[in-house]
Image (cartoon, grey):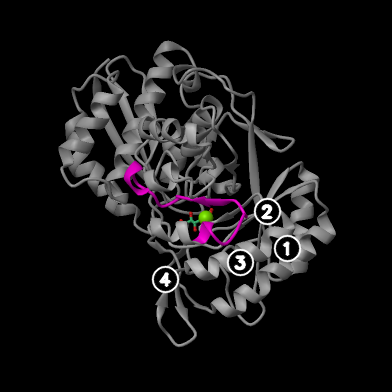
Amino acid sequence: MRITEARVIVCSPGRNFVTLKIVTDEGLYGVGDATLNGREMAVAAYLQEHVVPLLIGRGSDRIEHTWQYLFKGSYWGAGPVTMSAIAAVDMALWDLKGKRLGVPVHQLLGGRSRDKVLVYGHANGRDNAETIAAAERYRDLGYRAIRLQAGVPGLEHAYGVGRGDLFYEPAETGSPPEHVWSTETYLDHVPRLFAEAREALGWDVHLLHDAHHRLTPTEAGWLGHRLEDYRLFWLEDPVNDLLQDGFRHLRRHTRTPIAVGEVFNSVFQLHQLVTEQLVDYLRTTVLRTGGITPLMKIAHLAEPYQVRLGSHGATDLSPITMAAALQVDLAVHNFGIQEYMRHSDATAEVFSSSYAFDDGYLVPGAEPGLGADIDEAAAARFPYERAYLPVARSVDGTVTSW
Ligand code: GCO
Ligand code: MG
């Protein structure tokens, strides 16, 4: 099968998405997600100008070879724009191979290691009571794992809060929203949130929390230690993900399990974390790290160290990424949990998917390929709108991690 056309589709059904559709001379097509939140058009241009011309006329079946060609051929190594673009090609080629052979992609990755994929939902509210009420709603829907993000008294905004209790979408059209951040206020508050949550929800549900890269290793060690009493499933991104040495320091101070890696673009950002067993879960996704092909290698590296996958699954990853992630989650042995933030109704008008939520798990459909698609006519009804992620400042005005 030869590639005859590759279309870059940018749309904004509730938020921006960049999608690649690769069409072949046999009439089959494959789809891939290339969305990089807040910097979408950089990836669209990279694909259009630098990748699409290299795909036309190429055989669609040489996935590893094409991956290496695009990665090594670019010379500059792994960065978020390059890897998001390569990921879209990789997903689309796996989709095509599955469709051509008439099997879901997990069959090509070795078949199912499990029947269904444990997911966690994102409960949020302006204060602890609202957040706990949202968690109760999730539990009523059947969720067995829930991430709690609450507003912090004294701070106008906190990561993870907004747009309804079961939804969260940080990007805003127009200029970047600015939030004021105080680590002291936050550290004071989070243990109280989990104390109240365990009191209200009991112990029969997994609880998670995202610190969103904002703490120093010492602060994170202190927080992890304080949270031990509430037995978290994980504390996510406690420190800047790229500071691998910071995790050694953190590990000495807490037994709370640690998850990192939603911003990682390559195995080189995580190999030390894995081989020194400094973390418990990798948040690395198919999209950010260059596709299914490299994520399978990362999973295999992590398996003997008992580090498990806990892939990022926020709303800025389109249903195509979610479908691709589920194929990996089903196949690898060392799967832990999958983040599942629900997409908006507008997003569902444009993207179709065959996975379904059932009693705390996502169950992928049995259709060939990835099991997700884009309706281009529907996409055209939602034109791109420039949008930015928030920027945070400390109380004295210093720019800090959001
Ligand atoms: C998560 C993430 C997201 C990110 C978002 C940025 O754990 O789901 O931290 O909420 O902030 O994906 O685009
Ligand atoms: Mg996160």
Q: Mark 4, mark 2: which one is toward the viewer?
A: 2
The image's mark for residue 194 is 1
In primary-sequence order, the first of circles 4 and 3 is 4
Q: Where, by quadrant of the figure, is residue 337 drawn? A: top right
Q: Residues within 10 Å of mark 1 (few under 14, many from 20)?
A: many
The image's mark for residue 223 is 3
Q: Are marks 3 and 1 in contact (CB under 8 Å)?
A: no
Which residue is at a point 67% across and 35% down the rendered structure image?
361
- Residue type, label 3: Leu
The alpha-carbon separation of the residues under discs 4 and 2 comes to: 32 Å
Q: Nearer the viewer, residue 159 or 196?
A: 196
- Residue type, label 4: Pro
Q: Is mark 4 within 8 Å of ligand 1?
A: no
The alpha-carbon separation of the residues under discs 4 and 3 comes to: 29 Å
- Residue 294 shows in this picture: yes
List x then y, in percent, for residue 380.
41, 44
- Residue type, label 2: Leu
Q: Residues within 10 Å of mark 3 (few under 14, many from 20)?
A: many
Residue 131 vs residue 276: left or right? Answer: right
Which residue is at a point 42% across and 30% down the rendered structure image?
296
Q: Are marks 3 and 2 in contact (CB under 8 Å)?
A: no
Segment colored magenta? 250-269
Which residue does the numbered mark 2 point to in the structure image?
A: 232
List x then y, in percent, for residue 140.
80, 46
Q: Are marks 1 and 2 in contact (CB under 8 Å)?
A: yes
